[in-house]
């Protein structure tokens, strides 16, 4: 089969420690990479993620990134209409250059596609929690949800649009990718202790768990009412229903019994929604909000550079519980990368989840738009698993591959990419 793209991410500190030339050449030589992108706005997360120490970095053992810094130039005038302003690195070794332009320079010399990613959090979450809590999502009880910004807040929406617009306006990129966190999807409610066999999908537990998420802020309320929803009834109904979600751990004995009866039964998630129309309306409302957000960002990007590709990097097990419906946003994305890394956990399900998710995305956005299958090439994976993964995804009509991630990879695992593509009959064709 023919694919168009083999993409790989790089971080600013990768480029600072190894040079962009070395990083890119390693990826091209060992893994057939023809597309590179800078994770240009990165959340707090120890790197490398799945191992204690770096494998290819000659300068440091590991790195602790700053909170949601922008590592490239943007135009400050683009942020004039929001109180939120981008924060830049304070690390001396990273202040020296625009790291996106540095990667673009090297990529263009080698004829590669090049992009930038806005990662999970696009603004300093600690600053927001301490100084601007009104920016954060609220749960049904009015408590702020750390790290999750509410895109129905006008300042947040304007900042997001400005960040994407300015990123493509100021730089020669082919695509801008994001795995920004959408609505907080809560945490699945655990199945009862007395069930001898647990359902690995636990769909009713996932659905019920959304009630621990957001958002119920004043901006969501105003928007819901404008859309025609009875927000007061929705919030009142879901406040009561949220007690069921909490009952397993914190309820009185009557609530615990009710929760156990519910989660121990074979009631479907559809049946539960039929019993609780306010829950369905809330989920639908969030989906409409996320679709509108994608439309706004997509329009902002296309207004300045129509040729730049807007790509969503899906990291969600059940995107619909975060407000993302791929059918609804299909007109506002140019491609989707699925961020499944089953390889690093031994693919205990024989890659079933990876297959199911790729097909869900394809069903949603259609066959005319590219879908990229990600895979782990870091130490907890093995060459055998990478080869097997590529063999499986080669049968699923994908348009590209995406490595996750160079900063934790070994040459043995990078070589397995090229070997796996050859064994699967996968060839890169950019026509």
Image: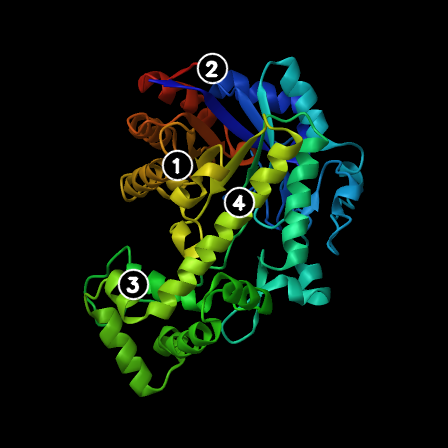
Quarter placement of the C terminus: top left
Q: Rounded to the nearest whole Å, what is the CA distance between mark 1 and mark 4?
A: 13 Å
Which residue bears the numbered disc 4? 294
Q: Is residue 399 left or right of residue 394?
A: right
Q: Residues within 10 Å of mark 3 (few under 14, many from 20)?
A: many
Q: Rounded to the nearest whole Å, what is the CA distance between mark 2 and mark 3?
A: 43 Å
Check if mark 4's residue and mark 3's residue have beta carbons within 8 Å: no
In percent of width and height, residue 102 lies at 71, 26
Q: Residue at x 33, y 31 (%)?
A: 389
What numbered label is drawn on residue 365?
A: 1
Applied colour scheme = rainbow
Compared to 264, does 396 lie above or below?
A: above
In percent of width and height, residue 64 lies at 65, 47
Mark 4 vs 3, N-terminal side: 3
Residue nearer the viewer, 196 or 251: 251
Q: Secondary structure at mark 2?
A: loop
Mark 2 vs 4, N-terminal side: 4
What is the residue that sits farthest to the bottom in this orientation?
Answer: 253
Q: Residues within 10 Å of mark 1 (few under 14, many from 20)?
A: many
Mark 1 vs 4, N-terminal side: 4
Which residue bears the numbered disc 3? 204
Residue 52 visible at all: no
């Amino acid at each position: 089969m023919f694919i168009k793209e083999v993409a790989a991410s790089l971080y600013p500190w990768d480029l600072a420690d190894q040079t962009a030339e070395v990083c890119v050449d390693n990826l091209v030589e060992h893994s057939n990479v023809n597309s590179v992108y800078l994770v240009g706005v990165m959340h707090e997360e120890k790197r490398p993620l799945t191992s204690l120490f770096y494998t290819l970095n000659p300068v440091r053992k590991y790195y602790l990134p700053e909170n949601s810094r922008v590592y490239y130039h943007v135009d400050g005038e683009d942020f004039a209409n929001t109180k939120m302003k981008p924060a830049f690195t304070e690390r001396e070794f990273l202040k020296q250059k625009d790291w996106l332009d540095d990667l673009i320079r090297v990529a263009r010399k080698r004829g590669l596609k090049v992009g930038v990613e806005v990662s999970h959090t696009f603004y300093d979450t600690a600053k927001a929690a301490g100084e601007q809590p009104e920016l954060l999502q609220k749960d049904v009880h009015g408590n702020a949800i750390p790290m999750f910004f509410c895109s129905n807040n006008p300042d947040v929406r304007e900042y997001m649009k400005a960040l994407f617009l300015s990123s493509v306006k100021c730089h020669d990129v082919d695509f801008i990718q994001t795995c920004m966190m959408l609505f907080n999807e809560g945490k699945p409610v655990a199945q009862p202790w007395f069930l001898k066999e647990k359902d690995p999908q636990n769909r009713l537990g996932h659905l019920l768990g959304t009630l621990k998420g957001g958002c119920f802020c004043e901006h969501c309320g105003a928007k819901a009412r404008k859309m025609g929803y009875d927000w007061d009834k929705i919030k009142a109904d879901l406040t009561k229903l949220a007690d069921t979600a909490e009952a397993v751990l914190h309820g009185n004995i009557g609530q615990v019994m009710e929760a156990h009866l519910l989660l121990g039964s074979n009631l479907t998630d559809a049946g539960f929604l039929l019993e609780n129309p306010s829950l369905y309306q809330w989920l639908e409302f969030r989906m409409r909000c996320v679709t509108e957000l994608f439309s706004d960002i997509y329009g902002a990007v296309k207004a300045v550079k129509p040729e730049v590709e807007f790509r969503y990097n899906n990291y969600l097990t059940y995107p619909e519980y975060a407000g993302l419906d791929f059918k609804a946003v299909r007109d506002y994305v140019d491609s989707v990368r699925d961020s499944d890394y089953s390889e690093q956990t031994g693919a205990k399900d024989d890659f079933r989840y990876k297959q199911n998710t790729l097909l869900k995305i394809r069903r949603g956005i259609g066959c005319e738009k590219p879908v990229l299958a990600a895979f782990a090439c870091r130490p907890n994976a093995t060459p055998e698993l990478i080869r097997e993964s590529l063999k499986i995804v080669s049968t699923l009509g994908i348009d590209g591959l995406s490595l996750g991630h160079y900063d934790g990879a070994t040459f043995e695992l990078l070589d397995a990419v090229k070997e796996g593509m050859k064994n699967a009959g996968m060839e890169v064709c950019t026509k």
